[in-house]
Structure formats: C-alpha cells, structure tokens
Image (tube, rainbow, N blue to C red):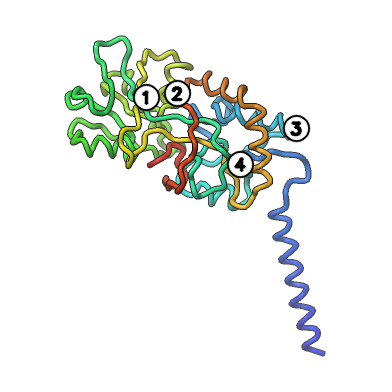
C-alpha cells in the first residue's frame, strides 16, 4: 500500500512539474511577436523605437497580423541565454547569418566595415593598405576584423582602440557610436567601423562623412557579412514564417535600411561552415 501511495505521489509531482514547464514554454495565447532588442544602441534599436531594427520589427509584426512586444536586453555577452533560451522572446531582428548560437533565416541584406573620415577636410583614404593610415590617428573597435587586419599590416602605434562592449546604465557615452563622435570632434582622423554605424551618422544626423566600404581582400579576415533574423534553435516554424515575410516585404525592408544609411552590398550565395562571433555581438566577426 505504501509503495502504491509513493508511486502516486511521484506521478503527481511529475505532473505538477510538467504542467509548470508547459506554462513557462507555451506560446502566448494571442498572436504576439516577441522581439529581443537592445534598449540603448542606435542605430539598431532603443526603447523609443527609433532604430532600424524597430522599424523592421514593425513591418514583420504587421505582416503577421501580430501585436509587437519587446523584451529589452543589451546585445552583450549572455544574449541568447538570457533571451531566446529562457523563452523571454522569440526573434532577434539582426544577427550574422552564420551565427551558430541561433537558427537563422536566409540573409536579407549584406553590409560591411567601412573607412570613415570627414568629407570637409583634405584627407583621402582608399583602403586598409593606404600608407596614410600609418601617419594619422586611426580609431577602430577592438577585436574586430579590421582591427586584426591593421595589426597584420603593422599599423598599431597610431591606433586608438574602442570597446564594443559597454555598460549602458553607468557609461552610456561609451556606446559603439562614440567612435564616430570622436572622429567628428577631431579626436581621431579616421574611423574604421561597422557600416551601419557610420551610415547612421551620415544619413540621420547629417554628419559630414565620407564613407568608403572596405573590400574583401583577405580570405582569412572578411570585411563584409550577411545578416539575418535569428530564432531559437529548433523553431523551424517561425523561421519559415519569417522567411516568407522577408520575401514579401523585401522592398519595404530595404527602404528602411537605405533610410538609415546602411551600406548595402549584393547578397551572395552562402559558403559552408559557420563563423563564431562572440555571443551578443551584432557586429560580425569579433
């Protein structure tokens, strides 16, 4: 009799646990698109919904006939663990296509790192091989592809390093766009930066910038990357739905990217083999 009671108790506990897990992982009762987004990282996203990821999310939600909700979490280390994997949200609007931390859609655009310098000055820079880069103050985000390539070319002593990982609560002034702000303020002469950041300053803020896409000349260190939407690994249903919308709304989404000055390159056939940018990194290749 005691054994039978014990079995029923265990069975009851398992039912309770299973019910709790089902409540935690079940999809919302109503049609909701839950987007994981950084609360303070323009031009990508912010709480005021002024980033191009916010605008693209609105297009996707409207196409799905869904209400748009956000779960705010900085695009920093621990991103997927604290968002998608914990079931807090369902989609990242803008991630590298070959990022192995998530299940990605087909790429919907391709962009690149760029050289940026003031258009109202006398300086001209053509590429990362340009000898002028050895004579001027060069700002670059550390541990990114152009940073590695500069080091390979022996351009080190005149390089000013900036961090992509910052604390928006205590040091909001150190956000990734500070590199371009310092360029405009004359603290550096050339900025080597992820294209969407430079394009945002030129297009949305009217900054006097000349922007030069960096060509892919070194097969080991690419400068351009395809970008996709990312969902929880295994969520093939949502991935397929998003790809349908990307096809149907291609022109509208491209118009948003152009409006934010994102340097757009032709989407190319994908190569096999994943890249592994650090988790939480929206600027690929770090």
Mark-to-mark CA distance, 2 and 4: 23 Å
Closer to the eye: label 2 or 4? 2
Asked if labels 4 and 1 touch by Cβ distance under 8 angstroms, the answer is no
Closer to the eye: label 1 or 4? 1
Q: Is residue 162 above or below residue 131?
A: below
Percent position (x, y) of residue 197? Answer: 43, 26
Asked if labels 4 and 2 touch by Cβ distance under 8 angstroms, the answer is no
Mark-to-mark CA distance, 1 and 2: 8 Å
Q: Residue at x 31, y 19 (%)?
A: 117
Badge 3: residue crowd in 10 Å (few <14, some 14–19, many ≥20): few
Q: Is residue 4 above or below residue 237?
A: below
Q: Residue at x 24, y 11 (%)?
A: 122
Asked if labels 2 and 1 touch by Cβ distance under 8 angstroms, the answer is yes
Residue sitting at the far right: 1
Q: Earlier in the sequence, mark 1 or mark 2?
A: 1
Percent position (x, y) of residue 110? Answer: 48, 31
């Amino acid at each position: 009799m005691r054994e039978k009671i014990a079995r029923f108790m265990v069975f009851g506990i398992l039912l309770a646990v299973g019910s709790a897990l089902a409540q935690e992982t079940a999809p919302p009762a109503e049609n909701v698109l839950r987007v994981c987004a950084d609360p303070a990282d323009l031009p990508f996203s912010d709480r005021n919904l002024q980033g191009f990821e916010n605008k693209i999310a609105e297009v996707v939600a409207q196409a799905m006939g869904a209400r748009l909700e956000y779960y705010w979490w900085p695009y920093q280390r621990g991103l997927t663990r604290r968002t998608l994997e914990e079931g807090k949200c369902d989609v990242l609007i803008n991630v590298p296509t070959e990022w192995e931390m998530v299940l990605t859609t087909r790429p919907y655009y391709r962009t690149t790192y760029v050289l940026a310098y003031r258009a109202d000055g006398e300086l001209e820079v053509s590429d990362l091989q340009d000898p002028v880069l050895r004579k001027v103050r060069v700002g670059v985000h550390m541990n990114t592809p152009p940073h590695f390539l500069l080091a390979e070319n022996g351009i080190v002593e005149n390089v000013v390093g900036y961090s992509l990982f910052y604390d928006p609560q205590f040091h909001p002034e150190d956000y990734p766009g500070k590199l371009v702000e310092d360029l405009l303020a004359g603290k550096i002469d050339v900025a080597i930066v992820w294209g969407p950041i430079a394009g945002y300053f030129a297009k949305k803020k009217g900054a006097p910038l000349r922007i030069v896409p960096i060509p892919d000349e070194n097969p080991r260190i690419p400068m351009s990357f395809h970008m996709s939407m990312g969902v929880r690994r295994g969520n093939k249903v949502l991935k397929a739905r998003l790809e349908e919308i990307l096809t149907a709304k291609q022109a509208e989404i491209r118009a948003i990217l152009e409006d934010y000055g994102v340097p757009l390159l032709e989407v190319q056939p994908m190569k096999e083999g994943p890249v592994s940018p650090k988790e939480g990194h929206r600027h690929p290749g770090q």
